[in-house]
Image: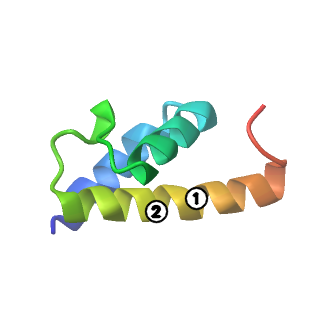
Amino acid sequence: MNSNLVEEHVTLICELGCVRVSEVIAILEQGKIAPETDRLADAERTQVLNELKAIMAVYNARKGGCA
């Protein structure tokens, strides 16, 4: 698994805003491939999902969710 590639994708997805991050999480949780993750291997996609969920958990705890 390419950790740098995972980190790059997480950063790019987060730059799209919390609404899109939530959408990407939902897509990945359904076992589908979000356009932002289509170049990743399954293991990398799973790692992106885990990292996005962790980031959103902190964000939601501080901000109370997406505006």
Image point (16%, 64%), residue name: 2
- Crowd band around label 2 with a 10 angstrom C-alpha radius: few (<14), some (14–19), many (20+): some
42 relative to 1, above or below? above
Which residue is most to the front? 30
Quarter occupied by the N terminus: bottom left
Image point (61%, 38%), residue name: 18
Q: Position of residue 41 (x, y in %)?
A: 15, 56
Image point (61%, 32%), residue name: 19
Q: Dots 2 and 1: beta carbons under 8 Å?
A: yes
- Crowd band around label 1 with a 10 angstrom C-alpha radius: few (<14), some (14–19), many (20+): some
Q: Identify residue for label 1.
A: 55
Residue nearest the viewer, comparing 29 with 1 = 29
Specify whether 38 is left or right of 22.
Answer: left
Q: Secondary structure at mark 2?
A: helix
Specify whether 5 is left or right of 18.
Answer: left
Q: Identify residue for label 2.
A: 51
Q: Position of residue 40 (x, y in %)?
A: 18, 50
Mark 2 and mark 1: span between their CA atoms? 6 Å
Specify whether 55 is left or right of 49.
Answer: right
* Residue 4 appears in the figure: no
Image point (38%, 39%), residue name: 12
Q: Position of residue 33 (x, y in %)?
A: 29, 41
The image quarter containing residue 42 is bottom left
Specify whether 36 is left or right of 10.
Answer: left
Say which amino acid is labelled 1: Ile
Q: Secondary structure at mark 1?
A: helix
